[in-house]
Amino acid sequence: MTLSRFRDSARYWRSPLLPGAELLTAEYHDHEFTPHWHDAYTVPVIEEGAECYRYSGSHHVAEAGSVPVINPGELHTGARAVDEGWRYRVMYVPVDYLQALAGEIAGCPQPLPWFDAEVIRDLDLARRLSRAHQLMETATDRSRRQASGAQTHPTPASSDLLTAEDALIDALSTLLTRHARTRAAPLATAPNEPRVESMKALLAADLATPLRVADLAQAVGLSPFHATRLFTQSTGLPPHAWRTQLRLQRALAPLRAGAAVADVAAAQGFTDQSHFTRHFRRMFGVPPGRWQTA
């Protein structure tokens, strides 16, 4: 029997229940995510098919009913693991929200929650996360229709939001109590770490200013070859790719605020709008204009 194939289709949206968060409802077949990171916790639930990805130095496969959480700032990829592709829902949960929730559960301030690199296989958790995501999406859509004056079901949007918020808190609380750990204290600073941090600072100082590897090398007293190798070993990306990812992360706030895509591209140091759009699509699966209209 031939399985139906998913198409590349992604919808980003936002909910007042998770301020500052992005939410994603998507299915993919041909799209492959290049190495990238998010500043938030990536909390997906795979609903159909399977996704494979590289994360924390290993190859992982997340099948239907699994929850492959990615910690903030951690490099990862993404692609189909089976012929038909995969369909999933994702919450990009802000760090301060999840840490505050952990504190509420414990009754006192908590360290940053952290999750093991292995795929979480917990069907009950997956159902809770999927339900919360669906309820938030329904409530958000209904609120928009009511705000626009469109006819909707007589159920008040406020009731939808209350039900969705209960489900959200339940799902994320379950994730924390069953699977969260405390991040281990960092080991003593490696001799080369200050050099990597210096190169990062130089790359991040003004994203619109052109830089060469020779500039980084000179700043830390290394040859271009050794500077590039050290940076790549430490971050998982060569300097130019790391800077591109940082540019994309910093583009999100002005896009969310309604800035023109062309202006954002120029301010973040991209050659032109098409250059920006190409990289943005690789990371988010949609062009910046579509992401912005969410």
Image (cartoon, rainbow, N blue to C red):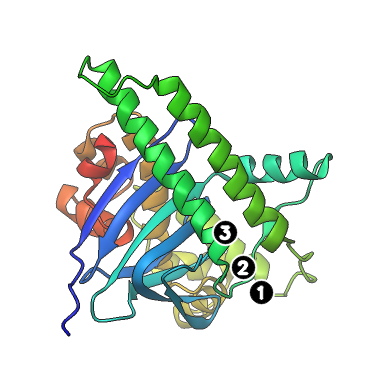
Q: Foreground mark, 2 or 3?
A: 3
Residue occupying image coordinates x 19% and y 78%: 3
**Towards the viewer: 23 or 252:** 23
Query: In the rendered picture of this protein, how many numbered marks are placed on residues?
Result: 3
Which residue is denoted by mark 2 in the rendering?
195
**Towards the viewer: 96 or 253:** 96
Would you identify the image quadrant in which residue 142 lies?
A: top left
Residue occupying image coordinates x 17% and y 73%: 4
Q: Could you give the CA–CA distance between mark 2 and mark 3, rounded to whole angstroms? A: 42 Å
Residue occupying image coordinates x 50% and y 71%: 217
> Mark 3 is on which residue type?
Leu
Q: Quadrant of the C terminus?
A: top left
> Where does residue 77 sit, x and y in percent of width and height?
40, 71
> Where does residue 137 sit, x and y in percent of width and height?
37, 39
Q: Could you give the CA–CA distance between mark 2 and mark 1, rounded to whole angstroms? A: 5 Å
Tell me, for residue 192, which label it has, or none: 1
Q: Is 259 on the left-hand or right-hand side of 185?
A: left
Q: Is 181 on the left-hand or right-hand side of 128?
A: right
Q: Are marks 2 and 1 in contact (CB under 8 Å)?
A: yes
- Which badge, 2 or 3, comes first in the chain's sequence? 3
Q: Are marks 1 and 3 in contact (CB under 8 Å)?
A: no
> Mark 1 is on which residue type?
Asn
Q: Is 17 located above or below residue 243 in the figure?
A: above
Examine the rendering and report whether any part of residue 37 can be seen.
Answer: no
Label 3 Cα crowd, 10 Å radius (few <14 / some 14-19 / many 20+):
many
Q: Is 50 located above or below residue 154 in the figure?
A: below
Q: Foreground mark, 1 or 3?
A: 3
> Where does residue 123 sit, x and y in percent of width and height?
54, 65
> Where does residue 70 sit, x and y in percent of width and height?
53, 63
Which residue is denoted by mark 3 in the rendering?
125
